[in-house]
Image: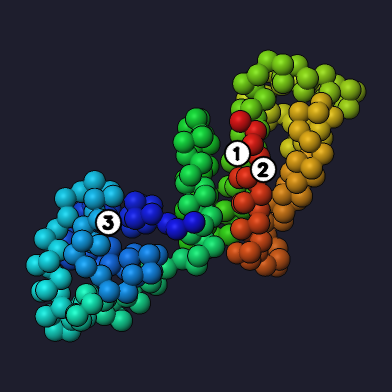
């Protein structure tokens, strides 16, 4: 999945307020890095700005000036313009996420239209922020929060699910008095017990139940101080599993 220019521009702080030169250099880096275009034309740049609905700077004028600058920002050839190496590396250092990072970020952003509550939108935004700066422990915690909050809303939104959940919880935990009535009432339940009850009530499949138990265990490991290393690959797995198999499917 290729990151769109709109998605890239949203990762650049206050992109709309950048100078014309900075807008053009960032757009050029995007075209080099994400679109694989090595020789850039004014029409390539203008198309980027068109995608985010802003008036393009006078790209032909700026490209010429930036190529004539000492030292040059762009290198000019018969085929078009290329960002000068140091300029390209400077932007790469700030926004050159690995391809897997971009794929995960795009996947998560794509969920925004499916998320209706402010709480879930906040969890999503925080997950993206954590992941984009390689704060993998925090992004695992937030990804779990997103999925668990979604489960809570999914149950509360259907009286039949509430009834089935409470019946199963009473059957499994005879001496406990907790019952689900609204989203706040979930604070009285252990997360593991909620997963067990959902499976007992057949509100989720055995596979989803096992997935949630595994991810809860890994969330707990990430949430507490330890010498365990949390890698990007592990984080990718947790986020994609929770997004694809919980948030996107329990609608």
The image quarter in which residue 163 lies = top right
Q: Which residue is mark 2?
A: 245
Give x and y (percent) for residue 2.
45, 58
**Up/down of 231 relative to 127, above or below:** below
Residue under the point 74% across and 37% down: 191
Q: Residue furthest bottom?
A: 71
Please name the residue that numbered disc 3 is placed on: 48
Q: Position of residue 1 (x, y in %)?
A: 49, 56
Single out the mark in the foreground, 3 or 2.
3
Q: Looking at the image, which residue is at 57% across and 53% down?
A: 139
Is residue 141 or residue 21 the one in the foreground? 21
Dot 3 alpha-carbon crowd within 10 angstroms: few under 14, some 14 to 19, many 20 or more: many
Residue at mark 1: 248
Please say if the residues under marks 2 and 1 sit with CB atoms less than 8 Å apart: yes
Left or right for 70, reference 22: left
* Any part of residue 126 in sight: no
- Percent position (x, y) of residue 241? 66, 49
Residue 238 in view: yes
Foreground: disc 1 or disc 3: 3
Q: Secondary structure at mark 3?
A: helix
Q: Is residue 181 left or right of residue 57?
A: right
Mark 2 element type:
helix
What's the CA distance linking mark 2 and mark 1? 6 Å
Disc 1: CA contacts within 10 A as few (<14), some (14-19) or many (>=20):
some
**Sequence-wise, which precedes: disc 3 or disc 2?**
3
What is the secondary structure assignment of the residue under circle 1?
loop
Q: Residue at x 66, y 53 (%)?
A: 238
Which colouring convention does the figure follow? rainbow
Q: Is residue 206 above or below residue 51?
A: above
């Amino acid at each position: 999945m290729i990151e769109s220019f709109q998605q890239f521009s949203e990762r650049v702080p206050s992109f709309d307020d950048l100078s014309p030169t900075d807008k053009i250099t960032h757009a050029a880096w995007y075209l080099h890095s994400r679109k694989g275009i090595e020789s850039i034309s004014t029409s390539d740049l203008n198309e980027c700005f068109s995608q985010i609905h802003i008036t393009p700077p006078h790209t032909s004028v700026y490209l010429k000036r930036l190529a004539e600058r000492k030292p040059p920002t762009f290198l000019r050839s018969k085929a078009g313009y290329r960002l000068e190496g140091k300029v390209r590396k400077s932007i790469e250092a700030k926004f050159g996420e690995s391809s897997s990072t971009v794929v995960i970020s795009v996947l998560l952003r794509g969920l925004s239209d499916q998320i209706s509550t402010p709480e879930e939108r906040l969890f999503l935004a925080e997950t993206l922020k954590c992941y984009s700066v390689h704060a993998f422990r925090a992004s695992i915690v937030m990804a779990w929060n997103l999925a668990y909050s979604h489960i809570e809303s999914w149950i509360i939104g259907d009286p039949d699910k509430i009834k089935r959940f409470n019946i199963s919880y009473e059957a499994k935990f005879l001496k406990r008095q907790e019952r689900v009535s609204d989203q706040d009432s979930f604070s009285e339940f252990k997360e593991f017990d909620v997963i067990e009850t959902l499976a007992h009530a057949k509100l989720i499949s055995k596979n989803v139940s096992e997935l949630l138990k595994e991810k809860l265990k890994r969330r707990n490991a990430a949430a507490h101080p330890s010498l365990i290393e949390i890698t990007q690959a592990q984080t990718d797995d947790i986020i994609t599993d929770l997004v694809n198999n919980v948030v996107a499917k329990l609608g």
